[in-house]
Image (cartoon, rainbow, N blue to C red):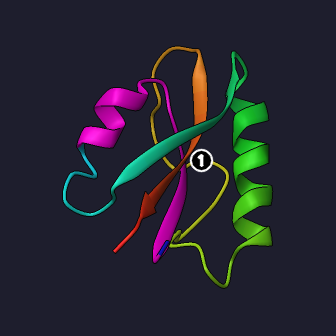
Amino acid sequence: MRAFKIGITNNPEARFSKYSGTYDEMVVLYKSQSLESVSEVERDLIEHNEEVARNVMGGGGGNYGDPPYYLYIVLRNN
């Protein structure tokens, strides 16, 4: 793996399509009805991986729509 990014979405398939050409794979790590819960886990993972993750901020940064919410990681292999 050459790069990865951690994020939140309520639609993994649609979100991954926006990474087309940049990342090769998406892995959903966590699902919850609580945006606060997913945001907290995202923030912790980004903080723990801050030196290698391709994130600008953690803990949510967008309008995610209705639940359920998914925490994901996208991976670039080459």
Query: What span is in magenta?
Result: 2-17
The residue shown at (33%, 41%) is 16
Secondary structure type for disc 1: loop
Looking at the image, residue 69 lies above or below residue 21: above
Residue lying at the far left in this picture: please name it: 21
Mark 1 crowd level (few <14, some 14–19, many ≥20, 10 Å Cα): some
Percent across and percent down for residue 20 are 21, 51
- Closer to the camera, 27 or 30? 27
Percent across and percent down for residue 54 are 50, 73
Percent across and percent down for residue 59 are 67, 51
| Residue bearing the label numbered 1 | 60
Percent across and percent down for residue 70 are 58, 30
Viewed as shown, does residue 48 lie left or right of 31?
A: right
Looking at the image, residue 59 lies above or below residue 54: above
Looking at the image, residue 39 lies above or below residue 6: above
Viewed as shown, does residue 40 lie left or right of 65?
A: right
Residue 16 in magenta stretch: yes
User: Which kind of residue does numbered mark 1 sit on?
Assistant: Gly
